Amino acid sequence: MNPVSASTAMEAGKTTPMQLLRVYALEAKYEWLKTIRNRAFALPALLFPLMFYVFFGVLFSHGNEQAATYLLCTYGVFGVMGPALFSFGAGLAIERGQGWQDIKAASPMPAGAQLFARVWVCSAFSLIIVLSLAVVAATLAGVSFTILQWLGLIAIWVLGGLPFCLLGLTLGLVLKADSAPAIINAIYLPLAFLSGLWMPLTILPSIMQQFALLLPPYHLAQLALKVANLDMQQPALMHGIVLLVFTVIFLGLARLAYNKKAL
């Protein structure tokens, strides 16, 4: 069945599970192709975390395995935040400005297909980023993990990107196309710095260390650092609960923003 016949069946109210699955798969496929062909997004998202890690984690660390391991865990969080905020945030805002979201809203395609497609793209980009970081860390920086540690770290990175997808979705629904990239950068970079993703929080003033407890990247980074036993020794359950709370908050905000736009 082609996309047109699937869409026609949906419009007629005769959608079968296979037709619905095909709609979701096609939306995910074309969202991926659109994103990977957008070099202004794809190249920085894939290369910036890797370049920063090569500079700070490999060259600047001078064979310090502990520093390289710490930066691997935190730069992985930095890497997964980028696609989530910019694909959902800036990308969605730009599409709204161009009228594409109005066209999709008028079509019989379920809104859930768009959400699924963007989550899929963000997860795929995140996986590519963290695998690249892992290869560089293992081959050039001397980072040594067991297979289970590597798998656990990658799972924490990729699954932990969900709160940032929902934050990006909220921003993409409320920001204007011309201002979205600048505003998201103004959120993304301070979040990374204040959460200890670029340098250990212990060298920052105590008030900044306390403020980091309110930021979701800090909690995701601490879960990643637990794999290497380099975290602040706070309970993993606490970090998980905080990330879950932020996920629920951002989901609620995104839903409010979507309903407002739909009125």
Image: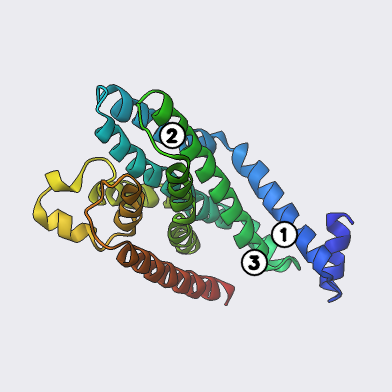
Q: Residues within 10 Å of mark 3 (few under 14, many from 20)?
A: few
At x 62%, y 60%, the residue is: 116
Image coordinates for residue 15, horizontal then vertical, percent: 83, 71
Give the quadrant of the C terminus. bottom right
Q: CA distance from mark 3 to mark 2?
A: 31 Å
Q: Earlier in the sequence, mark 2 or mark 1?
A: 1
Q: Is residue 113 visible?
A: yes
Does 130 appear above or below 60?
below
Label tally: 3
Give residue 117's quadrant in the image.
Answer: bottom right
Q: What colour scheme governs how the chains and residues are painted in the rendered image of this protein?
A: rainbow
- Kindly state the secondary structure of the residue where label 2 is placed: helix
Q: Between tags 3 and 2, which lies in front?
A: 2
Give residue 219's quadrant in the image.
Answer: bottom left
**On the rendered structure, is 231 left or right of 240?**
left
Check whether the beta carbons of the residues at disc 3 and disc 1 lie within 8 A of each other.
Answer: yes
Image coordinates for residue 176, horizontal then vertical, percent: 46, 57
Pointer 1 residue: 24
Which of the two residues, 75 or 263, is positioned nearer the viewer here? 75
Image coordinates for residue 47, horizontal then vertical, percent: 46, 31
Give the quadrant of the N terminus. bottom right
Does 25 appear above or below 244?
above
Q: Between tags 2 and 1, which lies in front?
A: 2
Q: CA distance from mark 3 to mark 1?
A: 8 Å
Q: Residues within 10 Å of mark 2 (few under 14, many from 20)?
A: many
> Amino acid under label 2?
Leu
Pointer 3 residue: 112
- Kindly state the secondary structure of the residue where label 1 is placed: helix
Residue 133 disc label:
2
- Kindly state the secondary structure of the residue where label 3 is placed: helix
Does 198 appear above or below 176?
above
Q: CA distance from mark 2 to mark 1?
A: 30 Å
